[in-house]
Amino acid sequence: MTRAVDARLTVDGTTRELPLERSTVGNDGVSVATLLSDTGLVTVDPGFMNTASCESSITYIDGDQGILRYRGYPIEQLAQNSTFLEVSYLLIHGELPTADQLTALNERVARHMHVHSGIKAFLEAFPRDAHPMAVLSGATSALSTFYPESVGRGEHEIELATVQLLAKTATVIAYLQRRFTGGDLIEPSRDGTYVDEFMRIAFSGTDGSLDIDPTIRRALDLLLILHADHEQNCSTSTVRIVGSSQANIYASISAGIGALSGPLHGGANEAALGMFDNIKESGDTVEQFVAKVKDKAEGARLMGFGHRVYKSYDPRGAVVKDVANTVLAELGGNDETFQMAQRLEEIALSDEYFIERKLYPNVDFYTGLLYSAMGFPRQMFTPLFALGRMPGWIAHYREMMEDPRTKIGRPRQIYTGEVARDYAPMDQR
Ligand code: ACO
């Protein structure tokens, strides 16, 4: 990083030079870290519309061009050629693995997929219809209590926690799927490959065997790759801010899972399918629904549309749409809903409201249709997103911990409350 002094800010007639922070590609930054002590002013940026909270070398997005790269590799190339565990290694360690490194990761993750009986009891204690994101968040935090040897900031602990999180959250999510179907929790085999083992635990009969359709296997692997990281989004920023207090990685990722559950973030995949169903049930045409969205009177949004960073087509959305085309044709998924989704997209993309605001389908617009075709109930869509995002959260936590400049995340505020007043006794209120 090179620094230059070529941004200037004038306050009360006095001009100060603000250092620039240079990126390798994309937006450079103006550092305002000393503004408060120099001027008594804070910067105001609700929703962090224009705030870079850290330097990161993991993922690059160009929202205007629709570009997404993990460690410099275009998402399209990774989607075409890679596997989820390979991408996980890339995100976490910075380079694509050699064959030996990938085999070692596969074997290590497979060995750690079993979970403590206490975790199974924990999962069983929740009502069967509990939302799996709430259970997943609790279970992820609880993992730290069952595996204390992986809790800590030392290299060994972080390496162990990395494998534990990749492996055990996959088993937990597969168990959550299994609970929906009323099946007993079966044991991981300890030597399977990641996606196969996840599907076997999620879908096999009581004898533990499952014939995995290669189309579904590939589609799921690909969806996990597409979700694996997305720089400083809401859940990743949550992981970082919690981790910045030196909370352990399990607690930090558990908080990130809570952030992901919201319908404006990861919960949008579940909300989008709900929206398609609501349109059908209401008897509205898609045109009438779009008119309601534009009217804003009922507060309806086109779920799976719009993005804080992408002001063009989300490159992940484009890949998902392609895969949905292939998979639904082959598996015979809900064609009527897919057609409705495509019609909604077509209408929105040619409508002035959406054009003006640069609203395009995001990754979540079509994923629900795919997950449905694979046999997942709607409540499982966001946990599947969490499964994909796990290596991204881990990579960001590790990057932050390795950066000696990391400080506890602690924003300022503009106070607008009462200035000062005296306590009033109860009988005088
Ligand atoms: N449908 C209708 N109008 C929308 C939508 C939408 N999906 N998204 C944004 N808008 C409108 C807003 O009403 C606003 O209009 P205005 O200028 O007339 O007030 C304008 O577009 C800007 O929207 P903001 O909410 O200010 O944009 P922001 O960057 O804060 O929000 C977000 C981004 C949350 C993703 C938003 O587009 C949204 O709610 N989308 C639907 C939910 C969704 O799909 N979330 C998943 C995002 S991807 C992910 O997290 C994996």
Image: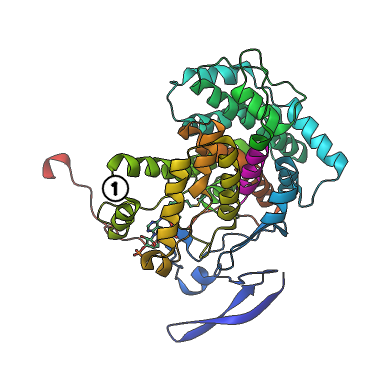
Vertical position of residue 150 compared to residue 291: above or below: above
Dominant SS in magenta: helix
Q: Under tag 1, what secondary structure?
A: loop
Residue 251 location in percent, x, y?
A: 57, 37
Quarter-of-image position of residue 129: top left
Q: Nearer the viewer, residue 228 or 125?
A: 228
User: Which residue occupies 23% across, 48% down?
Assistant: 423
Point out the image quarter for the N terminus. bottom right
Q: Residue furthest top?
A: 207
On whether residue 250 falls in the magenta region, the answer is: no
Read off the magenta span: 218-229
Residue 327 location in percent, x, y?
A: 59, 41
Find out if the beta carbon at label 1 lies less than 8 Å from the nearest ligand 1 atom: no
Point out the image quarter for the C terminus. top left
Q: Nearer the viewer, residue 175 or 340?
A: 340
Q: Is residue 2 left or right of residue 427?
A: right
Vertical position of residue 22 compared to residue 390: above or below: below
Vertical position of residue 159 compared to residue 341: above or below: above
Where does label 1 land, which residue? 284
Quadrant of the picture in which ligand 1 is shown = bottom left
